[in-house]
Amino acid sequence: MGCAVASLVAPGPTIWRAMEPVDFALIGHQESWRAAADVLAVLRGARLPDEEIRDILPWIPPRAVCHVEVGSHTGISARGVYIDSFIPPDRLGSAYLHENVARVRAAAACAIRAGARIVSLGGFSSILIEGNFDQLPEKHETVFTTGNTLTVAFIVQGMRKMCALEGRELRESTLLIVGATGDVGSGCARCLAPFVKRLVLHARNRERLRRLAGQLRADRVEVELAADTQDVSATADLVICAASLASSSLLLGRVAPDAIICDAGYPKNLSPNAQMPEAKIFFGGLGQISGGMKFTPDFRGILNRHPFPDVVHGCLLEGMALALGGRFEAFSRGRGFITPERVEEMERIAARHGIWLAPLYNGEGAVGLAGR
């Protein structure tokens, strides 16, 4: 198996060059077998049968797969590296927790060896580490950020934009947040709670849910806790899905037929079986880099699978924005520290370098024009 793996991922002469110190590193993984197959096809120079990829992928260690250069509209640029942890798409569940944490640790070690000054944790990498930063390798010159603050910023901006497009008033709306006790979900709750009529929180951890509700109620926010998305007394007309689900399996209950729904999960939260033909669904937490982005080798449309150019998940964009701003700091670290003030600060850092809310879209295409 070792020889097969080596031949599968061995880079050609144009894929990698002598490692030089870089400004940032991005750690991620693919959310589907098709995406994983596309990454391996670029690395190998040819496609393998799906069944062979499923056999080999779990044996591939985390490694850097490409260089990334990102530009600011101020004229400066930052150099980085993308590191894939090669977490198999069917191994995101809790049964593989220790295995996946080990993969993220190994990917973090790759970033340190690359000389990255700041590292963004994408997808399940941030979920695995957001409450366990002590599990990352210690290296004084390299700092890590979950990237969740910028993700929250783009979710909130997207929800506000969709409300404006649909003629909805936030102050007259009931907002349901699924995955409310996670770093992203709780950040969205803190940012939007003062502006909605009612807030409904759903999460699996009841104790953390009660603590969050108590904090919000102290600010005179009307909060309801839901043990199940079916168990809600008020029908939600705004929904943010930010749960750490291993697959697209969420079925919503007690949601208005024409609800505005932001699916910010990675993988996506909403089940393909969810029948909501009148709902306005968009994928949240995404930003666009006006200064452009270049991959070496060319992974455009593979590492960023979006219908618009230079669109990236906010968790990865945060590291790029901080690198462009020369702020090599653990901006988002740990669970529960995302506040409206921190979100506004991160929005300013990103906007200074032309990183804005991406055009809104869902699985069927564009649903509105991007706002800045």
Image: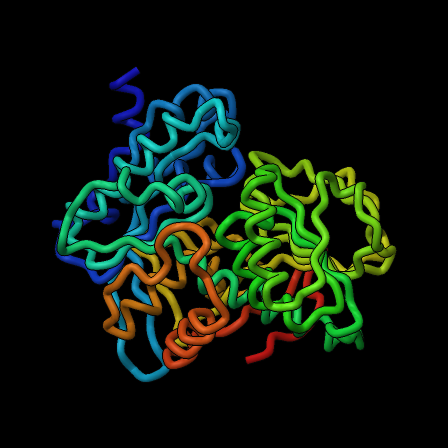
* Residue drawn at x 17%, y 49% as measured from the top left: 114
Q: Where 248 falls versus 181 (above or below)?
A: above
Q: Where 360 falls versus 47 (above or below)?
A: below
Q: Quadrant of residue 320?
A: bottom left
Q: Quadrant of the C terminus?
A: bottom right
Horizontal and vertical percent position of residue 37: 47, 35
Q: Quadrant of residue 74?
A: bottom left
- Judging depth in this view, the residue of 217 and 338 nearest the camera is 217
Q: Quadrant of the N terminus?
A: top left
Q: How many numbered discs?
A: 0
Q: Where 325 falls versus 79 (above or below)?
A: below
Horizontal and vertical percent position of residue 106: 26, 35
Q: Where 227 falls versus 5 (above or below)?
A: below
Horizontal and vertical percent position of residue 200: 71, 54
Horizontal and vertical percent position of residue 279: 81, 57
Q: Quadrant of residue 70?
A: bottom left
340 left or right of 179 in image: left
* Residue drawn at x 49%, y 60% as measured from the top left: 151
